[in-house]
Image (cartoon, helix red, strand yellow):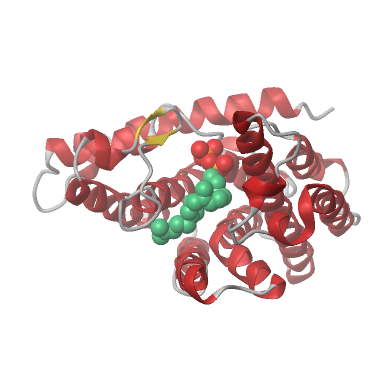
Amino acid sequence: MYDFRSDSADCAREVEKGLAAWLGTERLSGPGPAPERLIAAMRHGSLEGGKRLRPLLVRQAAAVFGMPAAASAQAGLAVEMVHCYSLIHDDLPAMDDDDLRRGRPTVHKAYDDATAILAGDALLTHAFALLADPACHPQADVRVALVLELAQGSGAGGMVGGQMRDIEGESAGLSGAEISTMQAMKTGALIRAAVRMGALLGGADPRALSALTAYAEAAGRAFQLADDILDVTATAEQMGKATGKDAAMGKQTLVAELGVDGARQRLNQTVSEALSALRTFGPKADGLRATARYFATRET
Ligand code: GRG
């Protein structure tokens, strides 16, 4: 029987080891050696922390097709590098201006703004080196498909575009439908890419890929709803309030639109949608099922 706690803990341990290895002096070198300060900032922004959910999704989607965890690990690291870069840039003064991330000083606080920008840039670039590397998958056509998937999920029509919509919406205001689109891009697109990359590694046929894409889109919505609910309830707790309604005000989230109870209801519906997208798959999809359920109950 699939054990979410042990699989997610194994995955997180392996991601930590893999990132530490790939963010070493030798592997980061190009025509010249990578500067020590840059390497240190990249490591600060990606090691020791994080739930490592996106590599877990790559691994679970590949497992649907019987792929062993080791065969999808490198692609999972690439997705995690893109995720870590996005957090480093999101924390910058020009974006969210946060001092803490994962309980530690953000990269621009521990180093400086320019180093944080470059550390994010270098993580993003390195992610694609991992996918192009033959150890990622023996077939070049699969590697190219992975590169395309991650580029589309993280670029202007995906995560970066979602961030732009979020920033634009802060002054213009967003409708409920616009918030959903923004979130599907900003947060959902990388989750979608992670699941689809696992499916591509596993050699999914078009029907399976489309079912897993439907799962990923619903799971991405569930992840974001859970994140927004946690944001509000944690803030309300800090402020000593009975509900997080006031804390939700002014934020472009579905919690502000639906209220905490409405958002919880929507979260449960969305998890059911994710689960029903997996109905044609057998027990090999239990990992993906467990992650969708985890999104409804997570506390961090
Ligand atoms: C700046 C290019 C650029 C993109 C920013 C992802 C993102 C887009 C911003 C992060 C802001 C944020 C907190 C979004 C909410 C959803 C989210 C991505 C939460 C963090 O992901 P987790 O919970 O984090 O997987 P850990 O630390 O566990 O990896």
Residue pictured at 52% horizontal, 77% vertical: 172
Is residue 30 shown left or right of residue 94? left
Is residue 99 shown left or right of residue 201? left
275 and 105: which one is in front? 105
Query: For residue 298, what is the image quadrant?
Result: top right
252 and 196: which one is in front? 252
Is 177 situated above or below 203?
below
Viewport quadrant of the C terminus: top right
Is 26 situated above or below 198?
above
The answer to whether residue 251 is visible is yes
Residue pictured at 30% horizontal, 34% vertical: 43
Is residue 48 shown left or right of residue 117? right
235 and 123: which one is in front? 235
Residue 228 at x, y percent in the picture: 65, 48
Residue pictured at 31% horizontal, 58% vertical: 94
Viewport quadrant of the N terminus: top right
Residue 299 at x, y percent in the picture: 69, 31
Residue 269 at x, y percent in the picture: 88, 54
